[in-house]
Amino acid sequence: MMQQRSVTDMDVVVIGGGQAGLAAGYYLRRAGHRFVILDDQPVPGGAWPHTWPSLRLFSPAEFAALPGWPMPPWPDGFPPASHVVDYFTAYEERYDLPIKRPVRVTGVDRDGQHLAVTTNQRIWRARRVISATGTWQQPFWPLYPGAREFTGRQLHTVDYRQPSDFAGARVVIVGGGNSAAQLVAEISTVATTTWVTTRPPRFLADDVDGRVLFQVASERAAAIAAGKPDPGGPASLGDIVMVPEVREARDRGVLQALPMFDRLTRDGVAWGNTVQHADVIVWATGFRPALAHLRPLRLREHDGTIAVSGTKALKEPRLHLLGYGDWTGPGSATILGVGRTAKAAVAQLDLDD
């Protein structure tokens, strides 16, 4: 006989203990809500412990702060991922956030006046749910002819750790964003690299970093809130931040992107009759929102997102979505920007009450 899971009632359940979940926890604590944060990771830090060790922020530490407490400064350029993990760990302790880990949420469904959050341990019944699971656990792999015939190695950004793993290899790197440019910069120091993109890469000016991008995102948020025409966010400036490693790769002449190939072959990629041999293909092709736990609610649109007003789901107003990208608030996928949407989400909870 299957053992019945215990049920615990809570005002708010936050799903995800990364930057969005922590920002939500800060404002929920300040507003006096009875809440819990459920995190499926064994350690603090959200996605950051899983990134490659050399990854750095695009901004100085003071422009990567969660609400209430600045990130400690980093003396040597932009902070590495390990510094972010240390900061998130200390942030949890500083604000005594009620985080349960590792807890895997298997589904969220309606339960009368509440939402039932089913986990591998118990069921949490909440008046409101904030989904803050991010995108790292949902890497996007595009489909191209010949992918199954390719006999070399294929991996996604989530699998990358260090350039020495590719020493002497012929590596094709796919993608036109920051991750792809940084991987080209690193891997090209030890391997022969070919960079392919679906459109010509758009490089930001050398003096544009996360500080400027946040300012542009803030101006966009203010314009939208005031009912003015959308002036365009950071994406209107370009896609790739010229961090020192990327600038150095540009100066070496390795950031020359080719158009996207037509297909994969047994030992490479091809454009028509032109074949480029490859030992490895790295797909730096981004991520999609990790929303599988919300399937029982049947809220997804054709583009994979959930329709929201601010952060509130239009088809289920007891649910808020936080930190997934601009569709859940301008700049909300950044450490600094998520605080603004977290504050608005918690304020909306109070209004609904």
Image (spheres, helix red, strand yellow):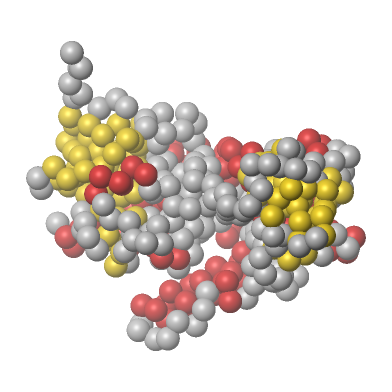
For the point 24% across and 63% down, which residue is it? 314
Q: Is residue 26 visible?
A: no
Closest to the observer, 257 or 21: 257
Vertical placement of residue 276 versus 203, above or below: above
For the point 16% across and 60% down, which residue is it? 352
For the point 65% across and 61% down, which residue is it? 177
Seen from this angle, which residue lies furthest bottom?
A: 228
The tally of labels here is: 0
Seen from this angle, which residue lies furthest left?
A: 112
**Quarter that holds the C terminus:** bottom left
Instruction: Judge from the rendering whether residue 19 lies leftward or rightward of residue 242; answer left or right.
Output: left
Closest to the observer, 198 or 84: 198
Instruction: Judge from the rendering whether residue 188 lies leftward or rightward of residue 205; answer left or right.
Output: right
**Quarter that holds the N terminus:** top left
Residue 334 % position (x, y)? 51, 58
Q: Is residue 352 visible?
A: yes
Closest to the observer, 88 or 273: 273
